[in-house]
Amino acid sequence: MKHKRELVFVCAGSDCKKAGSKQLKKSLKKEFSEGEWKGTCKLISTKCMDMCKSSPLAIVDNHFIKKADHPKVISAIKKALDNQG
Ligand code: FES
């Protein structure tokens, strides 16, 4: 798993922030910095992606994750990494 790498985008626009994207980024960052995830994922903040109705919005493996939360993002990453391998 170590050689695989996944980019994770989380919207940092104002609506998504209001909907909890800041908290989501914080918890993902923590998860990515330890254990089996170390060095596997890179977290990237984006500007508003014009999908504010679905906030907080994240993108994993070219797929939008609407109303994203920690478990949703993690399971999308797992799926993406499995597909790489
Ligand atoms: S603020 Fe996140 S999509 Fe608009």
Image: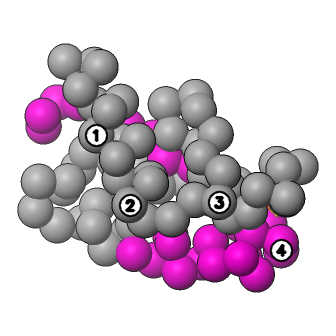
Point out which mark residue 67 bears: 3
Mark 2 or mark 4, which is nearer to you?
Answer: 2
Q: Residues within 10 Å of mark 3 (few under 14, many from 20)?
A: some
Which residue is located at x 83 percent, y 74 percent?
14
Amino acid type of the residue that numbered disc 4 sits on in the rendered structure = Ser
**Looking at the picture, how far across and down is residue 6, in whole percent?**
37, 37
At mark 2, the secondary structure is helix
Compared to residue 6, the image places residue 14 above or below, namely below
Q: Which residue is mark 2?
A: 71
Q: Which residue is mark 1?
A: 78
What whole-number distance in Å separates the C-alpha atoms at marks 1 and 2? 10 Å
Which residue is located at x 76 percent, y 81 percent?
18
Ligand 1 within 8 Å of disc 1? The answer is: no
What whole-number distance in Å separates the C-alpha atoms at marks 3 and 4? 14 Å
Relative horizontal placement of residue 3, taking residue 60 as reference (left or right): left
Task: List the single residue furthest toward the right.
Answer: 50
- The magenta span reads 1-27
Amino acid type of the residue that numbered disc 2 sits on in the rendered structure = Pro
What whole-number distance in Å separates the C-alpha atoms at marks 1 and 4? 28 Å
Point out which mark residue 11 bears: none
**Looking at the picture, how far across and down is residue 21, in whole percent?**
62, 72
At mark 3, the secondary structure is loop
Could you tell me if the residues under marks 1 and 4 are in contact, i.e. CB atoms within 8 Å? Answer: no
* Of the image marks 3 and 4, the number of the one nearer the N terminus: 4
Mark 3 or mark 4, which is nearer to you?
Answer: 3
At mark 1, the secondary structure is helix
**Looking at the picture, how far across and down is residue 25, in whole percent?**
50, 70
Could you tell me if the residues under marks 2 and 3 are in contact, i.e. CB atoms within 8 Å? Answer: no
Amino acid type of the residue that numbered disc 3 sits on in the rendered structure = Lys
Which residue is located at x 50 percent, y 39 percent?
60
Relative horizontal placement of residue 41, taking residue 11 as reference (left or right): left
Amino acid type of the residue that numbered disc 1 sits on in the rendered structure = Lys
